[in-house]
Amino acid sequence: MLKRVLFSGVMVGLMLIFTVSCEGPPGPAGPAGQDGLNGSDGINGTNGQDGEDGQNGSDGVDGSDGVDGQDGQDGQDGADGNLTCLSCHTRANMASIDELFALSGHYAGSYVGYAGSRASCARCHSHEGFIDYVAGYGDEDVAYPSAFKCGTCHGDHRSLEDDISAPLQTIEAITLLVDGTTLDLAGRSNLCANCHQARRGYDYYESIDSVWTHDVNGNDSLLFLVPGGSVYINSSHAGPHLGPQANTLMGLGGYGTSGIGAHSNIGCVRCHMGETTLTEGGHSFVPNLANCTNCHGAITDMESFTRAFQDGVSARMNAIAVALISAGALQQNDSHYYPRISTVSEDEFKAFWNYMVVQEDGSLGIHNPGYLNGLLTYAEAKLGL
Ligand code: HEC
Ligand code: HEC
Ligand code: HEC
Ligand code: HEC
Ligand code: HEC
Ligand code: HEC
């Protein structure tokens, strides 16, 4: 302790001396000190956040083309669109069909109200009835019957390939109502024969062996037995019904004769439709002379062509009708003869029946000249004419 105090005093003295003496120039810098020791390693930092995804790499180069497959087979040629369709579907053609159709009884539908809704009549007398019949529903009442229209006879095209013809509801062969005979008429005329055929045969009348008479209230009153050897004509509508043309064309439906003629093989459409004028042929269904000329040659008008033949048939029918009035089988209203409810002999009935077939056929013999004249010959013989 003493030494330290002593030492401090010396130092203070020295410092005083030194301060009062003059300052000298600074000494040269000392040599650099030795490097310090390396510090120890720092503590590891915490992990950084994930970086964002990098951009997609660019597409690789396309592979080389595969080998071409073999060519498929060529399809069938389609029909030439416009040319084929426009042979029917032009405005002008459709308009002329509308005009001709408007002349036809099919369009007028005069009996639609009377017969178009009744189950036993509808298939031939209304659009709805025929469509139901073709669809196979059988005979049913029709609630709201209407006259024939385009779609009564026409269906739609099942296909527009191959041969395109007017689509029809049915062209199947028909089974005759009266006896189940199958007929297959030419020229797509089976359509017509569905309706234009007899509804009743003579055997229906032959089989009537008794009939009830009615009292004033319409109730059954007395049973009347038809005498042997006679036939009962039970209605003023008796006969095959209008339109036995399919039967007569093929030589069927009357007593005593049968037979096909030159017209039998051509169906209905060829004479009743075919070539058109402004009022005949086509959808008027009125026979047009141009449909006859390629068989009958250079004829110039229908009236003079058919007049003599039809007049001949009419004259024979009138003579037969007069005899049938005497027999009680027919009655007369102006120049129209129609059935009378009566009991007649078998021979008279046969004459009556053949007369009705020719009358209801409506062509005055033309449909099947040989056959229809043959029916009249048989009737004349039965009546002793
Ligand atoms: C031989 C005459 C005829 C030719 C050719 C014809 N059609 Fe028709 N087409 C008809 C008749 C007839 C109808 C029924 C008309 C009706 O009921 O009003 C009809 C109906 C149609 C209808 C409506 C009914 C349905 O099938 O859906 C179409 C669509 C039609 N035809 C398209 C065509 C096309 C397309 C072509 C040509 C590739 C063609 N027709 C060629 C006669 C023809
Ligand atoms: C759905 C039944 C039906 C079909 C199918 C039918 N008709 Fe008719 N046809 C009738 C009836 C019913 C009448 C009587 C029409 C009337 O006056 O009301 C008639 C009348 C006629 C007439 C008498 C003239 C007239 O204008 O009244 C001729 C001719 C005729 N049809 C021909 C044909 C021909 C040809 C075909 C086939 C292309 C045919 N019909 C198809 C039911 C039919
Ligand atoms: C198988 C088809 C068919 C059936 C079923 C049928 N008719 Fe007809 N009917 C016709 C045809 C076709 C005509 C016209 C034929 C002609 O003009 O030659 C016609 C014509 C008529 C006419 C006109 C007669 C005249 O004197 O001008 C009357 C009315 C008639 N039928 C009533 C009936 C009644 C009622 C029924 C049912 C009880 C009936 N029809 C059932 C096919 C049929
Ligand atoms: C009573 C039946 C019947 C009625 C109703 C009828 N057609 Fe037809 N139509 C036929 C028959 C049958 C053919 C001829 C088919 C054949 O020759 O192959 C025909 C042919 C046609 C054709 C092709 C031949 C032509 O003249 O260009 C057209 C289109 C046609 N009908 C349109 C109509 C239109 C539209 C209506 C209504 C306004 C109509 N038909 C009503 C029976 C009918
Ligand atoms: C050879 C030609 C020809 C053939 C085939 C033909 N008809 Fe006719 N049809 C006529 C002629 C002609 C008349 C008499 C017309 C007249 O006297 O005004 C007639 C008369 C008719 C009538 C009575 C017309 C009326 O105004 O009362 C009907 C209905 C009829 N034919 C339907 C048919 C049907 C259905 C077929 C087929 C089953 C058929 N025709 C086959 C030429 C033909
Ligand atoms: C496919 C050919 C052919 C066509 C189409 C044809 N006929 Fe005929 N027609 C004949 C032949 C063949 C006869 C005589 C043989 C017979 O009576 O069967 C005949 C007989 C007749 C007769 C009886 C003549 C007589 O004095 O005995 C009349 C009427 C007649 N045809 C009218 C017509 C009318 C009307 C048309 C057209 C709407 C027509 N025919 C279309 C071939 C045809």
Image: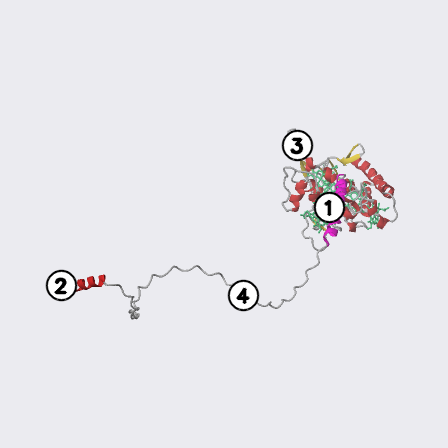
Residue type at tag 1: Cys
Give above or below for 332 relative to 306: above
Mark nearest the camera among 1 and 4 is 4
Give the Cα separation between the discs numbered 2 and 4.
93 Å
Q: Ligand 3 is in which quadrant of the figure?
A: top right
Q: Which residue occupies the foreground of this view, 41 or 330? A: 41
Q: Give the range drawn in magenta.
A: 80-102
**Which of the numbered marks, if any, corresponds to residue 5?**
2
Precedes in sequence: disc 1 or disc 4: 4
Mark 1 in CB contact with mark 3 (< 8 angstroms): no
Q: Name the residue under label 1.
A: 192
At which x and y percent is residue 95? 75, 42
Precedes in sequence: disc 2 or disc 4: 2
Residue 114, quarter of the rendered image? top right
Precedes in sequence: disc 3 or disc 2: 2
Precedes in sequence: disc 3 or disc 4: 4
Q: Name the residue under label 3.
A: 214
Residue type at tag 4: Gly
Report helix, strand or loop for mark 4.
loop
Report helix, strand or loop for mark 1.
helix
In which quadrant of the rendered image does the C terminus lie?
Answer: top right
Question: Residue drawn 73% across and 54% down?
Answer: 80
Figure colour scheme: secondary structure
Q: Residue furthest left?
A: 2
At which x and y percent is residue 101? 75, 41
Q: Which residue lies furthest to the top in this view?
A: 216
Mark nearest the camera among 3 and 2 is 2
